[in-house]
Image (tube, helix red, strand yellow):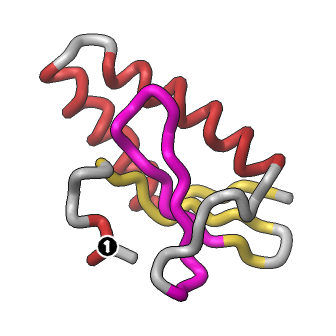
Amino acid sequence: MRLQWTPHAREDLYRLADSLNDGNPGAGDMLLHGAMTATRQLLAHPRIGPAIGGTRIRKWPIAQSPCLFLYMVRDDEILLLRVVHNRSDWQSLA
């Protein structure tokens, strides 16, 4: 199994890390660390996250942060679509 980040997901991760650091120094670093942990979990168990509303898109929380991965499993690939704050209107992205 291989993990692929979309450009949107990469941009989301760094934008959210910067935003979290503005309100709480170190929170963005926690997001980055949690993202590494979450990707290892997804690689070990690709379908661990629940599907969203009957779609192929799944969600998975990023530990020690208020954020989620939105991702899709395709053949031998996990495609990280977006990184979203769990309080945002992320359903419109799915």
| Viewer-side residue, 8 vs 67 | 67
Can you see residue 48?
Answer: yes
Name the residue at 32% across, 32% down: 17
Q: Left or right? Give the position of 69 relative to 46.
A: left
Q: Where is residue 30 in the image (x, y as percent from the top left)?
A: 43, 21
- Extreme-top residue of the structure: 25
The residue under label 1 is which amino acid type? Gln
Q: Is residue 70 magenta?
A: yes
Q: Give the range drawn in magenta.
A: 54-72
Name the residue at 54% across, 36% down: 35
Q: Where is residue 46 in the image (x, y as percent from the top left)?
A: 75, 59
Query: Disc 1 designates what residue?
Result: 91
Task: Name the quarter where the N terminus is drawn.
Answer: bottom right
> Which SS type dominates the magenta stretch?
strand
Q: Left or right? Give the position of 76 relative to 82.
A: right
Q: Position of residue 39 (x, y in %)?
A: 66, 43
From this view, report whether residue 32 is shown above or below residue 44: above
- The quadrant holding residue 4 is bottom right
